[in-house]
Amino acid sequence: MNANVTESGPAEAPAARPSRLWWWFVLAFVVQAAAWTTWLVIASHHRVEEVPLITNGR
């Protein structure tokens, strides 16, 4: 008798481990969101004056 087959049928394979790839995507998204938030907060505290694109006669 085959070791993988029981009287009730074939033995179930162990549960497959979920992929960690999704966690890398989530981590990358969180890091990117934190970087943008930090950049926007810093930029909002250091406003830049409007720079004219054309100077008159200079």
Image (cartoon, helix red, strand yellow):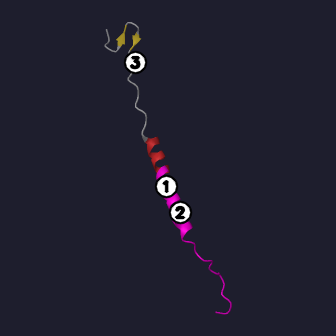
Give the Cα distance between marks 1 and 3: 43 Å
Q: Quadrant of residue 43?
A: bottom right
Give the Cα distance between marks 2 and 1: 11 Å
Give the Cα distance between marks 3 and 2: 54 Å
SS at mark 1 in the image: helix
Q: How many marks?
A: 3
Q: Which residue type does callout 3 highlight? A: Glu
Give the labeled residue for mark 1. 34
Nearer to the camera, 1 or 45:
45
**Label number found at residue 1:** none
Residue 40 colored in magenta in the image: yes
Q: With respect to residue 26, does 57 lie above or below?
A: below
Which residue is found at the position 49% from the left and 55% from the top? 34
- Location of the C terminus by quadrant is bottom right
**Label number found at residue 12:** 3
Q: Which residue type does callout 1 highlight? A: Ala
SS at mark 3 in the image: loop
Report crowding for label 2: few under 14, some 14 to 19, many 20 or more residues within 10 A (C-alpha): few
Callouts 2 and 1 close, C-beta under 8 Å: no
Which residue is found at the position 31% from the left and 13% from the top? 3
Callouts 3 and 2 close, C-beta under 8 Å: no
Q: With respect to residue 40, does 6 lie above or below?
A: above
Q: With respect to residue 54, does 38 lie above or below?
A: above
Q: Which residues are magenta?
A: 30-58
Q: Is residue 28 left or right of residue 1?
A: right
Give the labeled residue for mark 2. 41
Q: With respect to residue 10, does 40 lie above or below?
A: below
Report crowding for label 3: few under 14, some 14 to 19, many 20 or more residues within 10 A (C-alpha): few
SS at mark 2 in the image: helix
* Residue 45 in the image, given as x and y percentages of width and height: 54, 68
